[in-house]
Image (spheres, grey):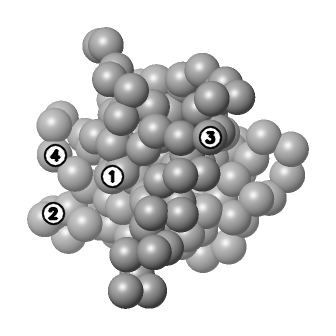
Amino acid sequence: MTLRYRDYLRVWETGYGRSDGWDVEQDGRAIAFLDEPRFEDMFWISYRLTPTAADVALRERLLTEAFWKGDPSSDLVFRSRATGLVAEHAFPAGQPFVAPARLNMRALYIAVRHPLPWDWIVLSVRRLMRRSRRVS
């Protein structure tokens, strides 16, 4: 997939997709929502897990370690709500929950290049424009 410049800007503005949350999809359907990212340890970020599946049994399983152990990420897709892009290499920790309904993940981000110096200028101008719109 070829990204447009505005896609890069949105990825960077949302902390590589982290700040606006993630839809967890299975077989093309959203089954859970991850939000409220919190740094846990080097490379590990935990998210509040909110099951959204229509199937009650699946919603309950999502809150168990058994669902996330092994390799569940092989059939799950983590899609950024900010950009609609997929985190290609995301996976849960071996001990997936750091607290009830708080899932510890690694590599849950959109992999794009880092901003170059002129990109930082564009990002700063966009941030100033958003602030000025809120004030007026």
Q: CA distance from mark 4 to mark 1?
A: 14 Å
Q: Amino acid at mark 4?
A: Arg
The 10 Å Cα crowd at callout 3, few under 14, some 14 to 19, many 20 or more, is: few
How many circles with numbers are drawn on the protein? 4
Q: Amino acid at mark 2?
A: Asp
The picture quadrant where one finds residue 65 is: bottom right
Q: Which residue is disc 3 drawn over?
A: 121
The 10 Å Cα crowd at callout 1, few under 14, some 14 to 19, many 20 or more, is: some
The picture quadrant where one finds residue 2 is: top left
Q: CA distance from mark 2 to mark 4?
A: 11 Å
Residue at image coords 25%, 66%: 52
Q: Is residue 112 visible?
A: yes
Q: Which residue is disc 2 drawn over?
A: 55
The 10 Å Cα crowd at callout 2, few under 14, some 14 to 19, many 20 or more, is: few
Q: Which residue is disc 4 drawn over?
A: 29
Q: CA distance from mark 4 to mark 3?
A: 38 Å
Residue at image coords 34%, 20%: 3
Instruction: State the SS at label 3.
Output: helix
x then y, percent, for residue 133: 37, 75
